[in-house]
Image (tube, coloured by chain):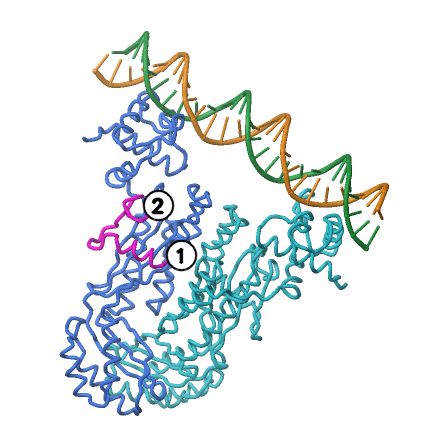
Chain colours: A cyan, B blue, C green, D orange
Amino acid sequence: MELSQRKCMILQAIVEDYIATAEPVGSRNIAKNHDLGLSAATIRNEMADLEDMGYLEKPHTSAGRIPSELGYRFYVDSLMQRYSMTVDEISGLQKSMDRKYDQLEGVISEISDVISKVTKYPAVVAFPRENKSRVRSVRLVLIEERMALVVVVTDAGVVKNRRISFSGDIDYSAIDAVSSFISKNLAGLSAADITPARAMLMYEAMGDYGELLKIVISFVMECLQEDCARVYIGGASNILNNPEFSDIDRAREFFSFMDSRENVGKMLSLMGNDNDDISIKIGSESGVDGMEDTSIVVANYHVGDKLRGKIGIIGPTRMDYARVVSSLEMINDRLVEILNKMMGQ
Amino acid sequence: MELSQRKCMILQAIVEDYIATAEPVGSRNIAKNHDLGLSAATIRNEMADLEDMGYLEKPHTSAGRIPSELGYRFYVDSLMQRYSMTVDEISGLQKSMDRKYDQLEGVISEISDVISKVTKYPAVVAFPRENKSRVRSVRLVLIEERMALVVVVTDAGVVKNRRISFSGDIDYSAIDAVSSFISKNLAGLSAADITPARAMLMYEAMGDYGELLKIVISFVMECLQEDCARVYIGGASNILNNPEFSDIDRAREFFSFMDSRENVGKMLSLMGNDNDDISIKIGSESGVDGMEDTSIVVANYHVGDKLRGKIGIIGPTRMDYARVVSSLEMINDRLVEILNKMMGQ
DNA sequence: GTTAGCACTCACTCTCTCCGAGTGCTAACA
DNA sequence: TGTTAGCACTCGGAGAGAGTGAGTGCTAAC
């Protein structure tokens, strides 16, 4: 059933008042504060309808109404007005991202602080994952006897390295030979291309250094398949500014959840991947136990079609969605700019 | 003034009861629960003395006594009994550290979870810093045109890398030449050894590649001097299990502090560096504003005399010091073992 | 269809009282 | 002289009860 325009106006007023005050909204207040040209009694009738339709709920009989999940959902999808950031906000944001970054790690870990500072909610950032990436080059660097560093560069321009140890002696020139052998044989390949058969052939060709090769190739595979999303969290304490978390048990639940990067990563991975739009999960939509009264807003960033990641915030369902969405959009744009530059693309 | 043995026993009883219950301790309870052979009245007199001497304080007239900072300090220095972990605790600890670690980063970030799980307090871990380290080798790996990866290995066995871009073309063999030139010229040098004069000489010798060299050398210097302690935090939510943090403002203060790695790093760096012992700062001893009712317990770990770092916990001043100290000792031992193995020393 | 009016509900706050744990002091005891 | 029993006093916290006010639903009039 469609909502009449009047119902929409009233619903919007309720959602926005509730977001601003965290108090259940009563009919009189709406009549007073919003110039709808309706009396409290009329609004009361409409509110009763909206409640029957599932958009509003009552904490108890003699309080005002608060939006239900459905109410928020409708607000976010159909009623929410674009928030335009003030000049001050924009210049503050630009200033805080105006550093020269030279490491992927540095950008990503700092971006979470920026997000939480701008939105005043806890921020979550997923380290970029690679998408169908291929090996660009592999290098072995001898660190000391029986210990070497493997450096893998993927075609997304991401560098990964790991120290490995092996038995058997090998000297500088031999390791260089192994190094270029591997690089030549793996360059341009994706994880799917490195079949056991192909690896086998390589082991045989290398003879003495087969063991070393084995270790290197398994690390290369790891690099290409890596998908345990590394996650950064910033400004978690911001959640305590919201009265719904002034109950200590509620707060503990939240912080226990955030203590586990794994949890957070899993939650992020459940958010929409495909589109450029911002995706929003309200309350139980996230499907995470114990997070029924938080909402998550996430934007996807990508560099070319190779590197992909997510930035977002977690807040109470009663969240300033409009502000959050436009802040995330701005930050996302700036982030992509920085990453593009850094990746030299 | 020395404390009589009787006063010591009473002080110890009070501290331990208060640690266990978080309730002010009254004279009757001590008489009942501890077999001191004294009546409540006598204990009362001694408690009044202890209060006069500054070891105890009263939250209000008709409550029991709680230890003052001085009281805790005396307890920690002189009264605390060694806690022996149970077989279950030890085997649990060993199991949780029984993974095969292959990256420094991985060990360090995971150790904070282990500590918080074992102690039930928020854990802080400082990434190892290098001490007077020297260059072992430097490698340049060409990633694409005008972009290379610098890999620096220090004599502590730590690997650092950074992507750099430069103007001017350079091919694989040329970059190898530059790479081995740099490595040869910097190997064995510490930050102090790489004087501007020496760098100048190198620039000149390299001619065309002077610019590239400049970038590389400045990165090498960074690696050797790096001392912005990276910090990992685990199990922060554990703080909420302590009733002194059930006040939401107190909790917010704590979490805001922990939100800033910088804060935490600064605090850690103020803790004792020199000795092998565990260092404990009680309440305001830490000198950090807003952390007057938390204590910090920190152990130093080191691998040889090169790598040094800290592991520790932050908890309420009313903390189970005995348990925390022995847990940290055990974890520290195990950590050092793992690091030694990993660094191949 | 809209509005004014009115009875009713219910969380919250404030006040008051009671209770119990704990203290300090005094006097008696070993 | 050190220890203990006894007692009056203090004070936070829990619980009961009354009052308040924001809000609702329903009815009747416009």
Figure check: B28 above or below B188: above
Examine the rendered structure and indicate whether residue B263 appears above or below residue A201: above
Q: Say the numbered circle drawn on residue B259.
A: 1
Residue B238 in the image: state x and y as whole percent.
43, 50
Q: Amino acid at mark 1?
A: Asp
Give B10 or B284, whichever is nearer the viewer.
Answer: B284
| Vertical order, B315 against A3 (above or below) | above
Q: Is residue A247 left or right of residue B79?
A: right
Of mark 1 and mark 2, the one earlier in the sequence is 1
What segment is highlighted magenta in the picture? B260-289
Measuring 49% from the left and 54% from the top, which residue is drawn there?
A239
Q: Quadrant of residue A182?
A: bottom left
Task: Tell me the subunit letter for badge 1.
Answer: B
Q: Nearer the viewer, residue A117 or C19?
A: A117
What residue would you read off at disc 2? Answer: B294
Front of the two marks 1 and 2: 1
Q: Secondary structure at mark 1?
A: helix
Q: Residue at x 67, y 51 (%)?
A: A30
Please give the name of the residue rendered at 61% of the width and 53% of the height, measured from the top-left corner.
A17
Question: Gap between marks 1 and 2, in whole Å?
Answer: 16 Å
**B263 drawn magenta:** yes
Q: Label 1: few (<14), some or many (≥20) within 10 Å?
A: many
Quadrant assignment for the N terminus of chain A: bottom right
Identity, as a three-letter code, of the amino acid under mark 2 = Thr
Q: Reply yes or no: does residue B28 show up in magenta.
A: no
Q: Quadrant of residue B165?
A: bottom left
The picture places residue C11, in percent across and down from the top left corner, at 62, 40
Of A135 and B219, the residue lying toward us: B219
Splitting the image into 4 quarters, where does residue A231 fall?
Answer: bottom left
Q: Position of residue B52 (x, y in %)?
A: 27, 28
- The quadrant the C terminus of chain A occupies is bottom left
User: Mark on residue A105?
Assistant: none
